[in-house]
Image (cartoon, helix red, strand yellow):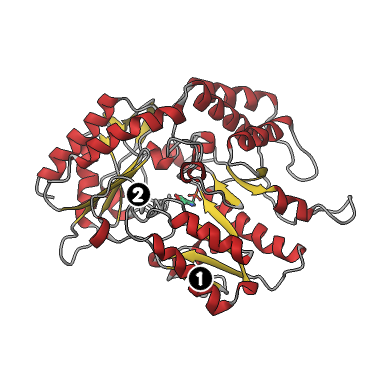
Amino acid sequence: MSNRLNTTPNDLRAFWMPFTANRQFKKEPRLFVGAKDMHYTTHDGRQVLDATAGLWCVNAGHCRPKITEAIREQAGELDYAPAFQLGHPKAFELANRLVDIAPEGLNHVLYTNSGSESVDTALKVALAYHRVKGNGSRFRLIGRERGYHGVNFGGISVGGIVANRKMFGTLLTGVDHMPHTHQPGKNAFTRGEPEHGGDLATELERIVTLHDASTIAAVIVEPVAGSTGVLIPPKGYLQKLRDICTKHGILLIFDEVITGFGRMGTPFAAQYYGVTPDIMTTAKGLTNGVIPMGAVLVSSEIHDAFMSGPEHMIEFFHGYTYSGNPIAAAAGLATLETYKEEGLFDRARDMAPYWEDGLHSLKDLPNVIDIRNIGMIGAIELDPIAGEPTKRAFSAFLKAYENGLLIRTTGDIIAMSPPLIAEKHHIDEIFGKLREILKSNI
Ligand SMILES: Cc1ncc(COP(=O)(O)O)c(C=O)c1O
């Protein structure tokens, strides 16, 4: 049998890469071959400082021994257990640990393998909940412009990024969108929560009036919208959404796939803002990005509504072959222990002001039209090159990579979210390098 890997060792053609400019990449590949703590090692032997925690997921830093060891041990002890009608201890243990750190009242956990699956699971739970409660007319789902909820059909339907939606037909029906909250004209260079825009939450009232509350199942938002360039909720906005949902019997879903696990200096953004959703989606930082896993947390009220009928019957017809996979569960437990032992959520809270100062020190650089931050998240919005949107930020990304710094760009916005183990000198290095890059003619 021929081994094509051996005969074509450097052939990059077969892998159609996700969310990537494939032709550009394959001309000038950027490959990581190793990682430790705050750094990646590239295929050409350079160190790259990680200012993005991989893809917003490696919150405890790279190749942490406790997590690596837990995976190794679990793989040798119990590799897989069927997820339906059978279980294994660590999936239950991890669910309990998650409930321990979750906002009060979110007491039950459904497992998934990704953020996208968490979102679609949450939407299905919401629809089914209303149905089991005898409110089957509540079928509408409300998302938000510029929202990102992964790439599956539910997620792109409630999401608000045109490029992610326009190719895929009619999507889910019965979906509407609230306006996004980005108001750079009023809020540019705000530190933390913007002053203006809290009232945009009342747009939900307008949507409720249009469709009638009796047709609406759920509203889904990212507490902080990450993928469209770090859009921080204006003061009072999330609480207003909560109040409107409660008033009309609509479930509120927080998509905490990037805001979860310490990114805001609290376990979840819900606790940071003091606003509790009915359903919360997570993934990424749950296993420190090491093994694919997501989790959806739901209130007791929702869970208990399903627990009726004959006891031998399945209560909710949904789940994945790998829901609560043993190795992922072991990674999740070791990750939560690492966060706890090292006090990483508090550390993020304490480091956030330093992060904020460093970020805003770039305010006077050419083409910088906005800087915004919350917790250990920061964004720099650049003036697009006329007629060539996204090019300026992508050039910054390429220059940063050449200069040993990993940033992420979306449109003409640089978004950053370093591992929560970042020291002050790492933060100085991130903004020192960025200063040089933005000063140069990009
Ligand atoms: C808020 C949010 N939801 C969902 C997702 C999708 O997660 P995944 O890529 O694991 O499917 C992401 C990914 O960035 C996200 O930021």
Q: Is residue 425 above or below residue 251?
A: above
Q: Where 137 falls versus 109 (above or below)?
A: below
Instruction: Give coordinates of residue 54: x percent, y percent.
Output: 39, 38
Residue 355, quarter of the rendered image? top left
**Along the viewing direction, whichever of 332 and 264 lies nearer the viewer:** 264
- Residue at the spot 55% in from the left edge and 29% down from the top edge: 336
Quadrant in the rendering for residue 199:
bottom left
Query: Which x, y percent locates residue 387?
Result: 18, 67
Q: Which residue is mark 2?
A: 193
Q: Establish if 255 lies above or below 30.
A: below
Report whether 438 appears left or right of 149: left
Say left or right for 230 vs 165: left
Identify the disc placed on residue 205: 1
Q: Kindly identify the amino acid type of the residue bearing the numbered disc 2.
A: Glu
Residue 316 occupies quadrant: bottom right
* Amino acid on which the number 1 mark rests in the picture: Glu
